[in-house]
Amino acid sequence: MAGVVVKPRARIYHGHDWVYSSDIKKIFGDPSPGDIVSLKDFKDRPLGSGIYNPKSQIVVRRFSRQKQQLDVEFFKRRIQRAVDHRETLGLDMQAIRLVWSESDGLPGVIVDRYGDHLVLQTLTLAMDQRKTTIAEALQSVIKPKSITERNDSPIRGAEGLESVKGLLFGSTPEAFDLQIGGLIYQVDMLEGQKTGLYLDQLANHAAVAELSKDLRVLDVFSHQGGFALACKQAGAAEVTGIEISASAVAAAQINATRNDLKVNFVKANAFDHLRELESQKASFDLIILDPPSFTKNKGSLSGALRGYKEIHLRALKLLQPGGRLATFSCSHHINHETFTQMISGAAVDAKRTLRRLANYSQRADHPVIATLPETEYLRGFAYETMGGW
Ligand code: SAH
């Protein structure tokens, strides 16, 4: 079998599963892109099996510490383990990420479940080449009515993969209604952003909603209205959502109607709209900030932080004394320290004292691997601004 010898001091010796091109001492046996390679340390000791893609910055991703083929039996075992793990978490199994890449030992494979239907993403070359085998394993373990492929994520570009979406198995329903928690959502597996909903935020919708009773709420970056709808349902006085995507606003409005909740969704650029609200001297009691990741790499971090700080500053100015801020970051490059420093910077500029009410993270169907810091990406906090302090 072809293989890769890894230089000393590479991350793999610290428990990581990725091998960058600069970590490689030697490639032997002439592997083809997408092949399985055996990994060896610089003293020729085995480190396990990985998937190989010389086009990617991450040339090898280890998926097993043993010698291992990627056959249907392997995929069935890994998928079953992922499902078993989810079943122990006490989450709603109808709207859930069943398989999440490295965190489930399947680098690049993401499977979301919406009722009887599955959405599959294969974001690495090796897994993409094996997507029919993966779909076969999913049919055997989960017995879904359909499997939709949502391989239109821009991350695939890094692996030299094209953007595709379509049906892999069964017949995909048009957008359909699904009861998730206390709310009915419209799920559009083929056309919705991501694979439909932001599953990683579902638990946080409910947690933030608990802070919203009788309050005037502004949900910034509202997508299909997850926070806005949960707050209104939990007894918020008035709720406004701001979202730039017309299709997300349309879905949010449909969701509001289905649930018989009155929420005002505004299609606008959040940066402009927050400025406009400020000039109108608007005020709110709870503001939720859940922006997209403004940075995909370390290089764009400082620009991203300026963007984060600007929306925080504007939000703080719109908050009544005693008002609450719930804020999230979904980029693993923004670690705890960077995020909290940016928030304190905005508090200093706005001359506000913020007292922390809660810590939030990604839902447990996106598990964190201790030695893979990239698997921990979603952070959030709730604060209250101290009135008359
Ligand atoms: N809060 C949502 C998820 C938000 S994801 C939930 O919990 O389900 C981030 C959203 O921000 C996306 O829907 C994206 O379309 C939107 N967005 C991106 N840039 C924006 C901008 N400049 N102004 C307003 N919305 C924006």
Image: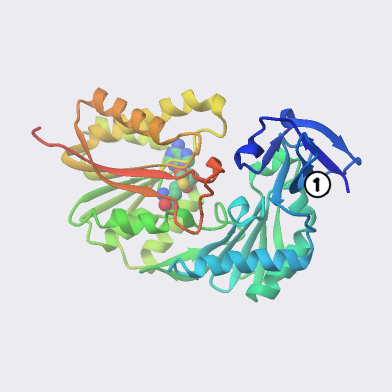
Choose between 70 and 314: the one closer to the eye.
70
How crowded pointer 1 is (Cα within 10 Å; few <14, some 14-19, many 20+) is rated as: many
Query: In the picture, residue 257 is in which quadrant?
Result: bottom left
Choose between 358 and 179: the one closer to the eye.
358
At horizontal 65% and vertical 60% (from top left) the residue drawn is: 120
At horizontal 70% and vertical 40% (from top left) the residue drawn is: 157
Say what secondary structure mark 1 lies in.
strand
Quarter of the image where the C terminus is located: top left
Query: In the picture, residue 20 is in which quadrant?
Result: top right
Residue 96 is left or right of residue 213, and the answer is right
The image shows residue 209 at horizontal and vertical percentages of 28, 56
At horizontal 41% and vertical 58% (from top left) the residue drawn is: 202
Q: Name the residue carrying label 1.
A: 38
Residue 169 is left or right of residue 362, and the answer is right
The image shows residue 180 at horizontal and vertical percentages of 42, 68
Residue 361 is left or right of residue 77, and the answer is left
